[in-house]
Image (tube, grey):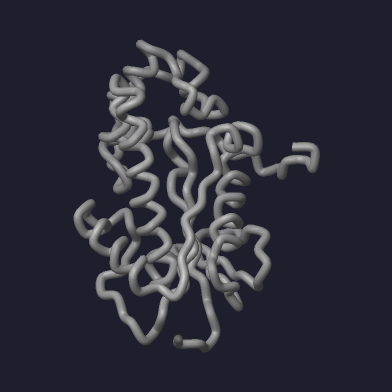
Amino acid sequence: MYRSEYVAGVDEVGRGPLAGAVFAAAVILNPLSSIEGLRDSKILTVKKRAALDLEIRSKAVAFCVAEASVEEIDRLNILWASMLAMERAVAGLSLQPDSALVDGNRVPSLSCPAQYVIGGDDKITAIAAASIIAKVARDRAMEALDDQYPEYGFARHKGYPTRHHLAVLRRLGPTPIHRMSFAPCRQGDLFAASDEQVVDNQGPEVLPNTATSVDPVAPSVAD
């Protein structure tokens, strides 16, 4: 087994959706077993992500996918739930990393030295690998939930605030897997569709300004 310094790439997916857990992954790549095409998961096709997911899982020195539940998102807020998911992913690795590189501008509380990398999923292959397997895992989880809540179209939009999703929310109300801490899930006046649209590369057409604002204050120990 190759052994030098074990550096884990860490990333999360699913901060923006109105429903479903937030997922994170940690990956330690083997420099002696290259994987071509590792890039930010959002710019890859579904087919390419699935192929890379299999290759990462077969070639990585270690990997782990973890999540924070909807209940944890609502209790902690999405920022701290994302941190929790990343902590779980690193803790779940079969090998303890010597250090970790984390996508974004914050570092979760890890058992190893860690550094954040802004835009890391486009710069660091291990972070890109983490983003890919986390994205594939979350998408599949949302597709499975589509069978339970067929009217909502989770297989299509993965919980993101598309026009269709917001229209169904307005008509049927939230399900137990909706994030009630996110304004569109609890305030009917925010369900109205905007004429301005953006394209979210993690999913289909998404409306702007529909996700929750993040509370910058950490939860208390009692939480």
Quarter where residue 89 is shown: bottom right
Residue 171 picture location, percent across and down: 35, 11
- Residue pictured at 52% horizontal, 33% vertical: 212
Question: How many marks are shown on the rendered structure?
Answer: 0
Instruction: Give me the residue at 57% from left, 63% from top.
Output: 90
Residue 125 coordinates in the image, percent (x, y): 39, 72
Given residues 33 and 208, the one toward you in this image is: 33
Q: Can residue 91 be spotted in the picture?
A: yes
Q: Give the answer, above or below, for where 66 lies relative to 214.
A: below
Where residue 74 appears, as percent x and y from the top left, is: 60, 32
Q: Quadrant of residue 158?
A: top left
Relative to 113, is 212 above or below?
Answer: above
Name the side, left or right, on which 30 lies relative to 200.
right
Whether residue 194 is visible to the viewer of this picture, yes or no, is no
Assign the C terminus to one quadrant of the image. Answer: top right
Residue name at image x 42 percent, y 62 percent: 130
Q: Residue furthest top?
A: 171
The residue sitting at 40% across, 73% down in the picture is: 60
Vertical placement of 212 versus 81: above or below?
Answer: above
Q: Is residue 152 left or right of residue 65?
A: left
211 to the left or right of 71: left
The quarter of the rendered structure image containing the N terminus is bottom left
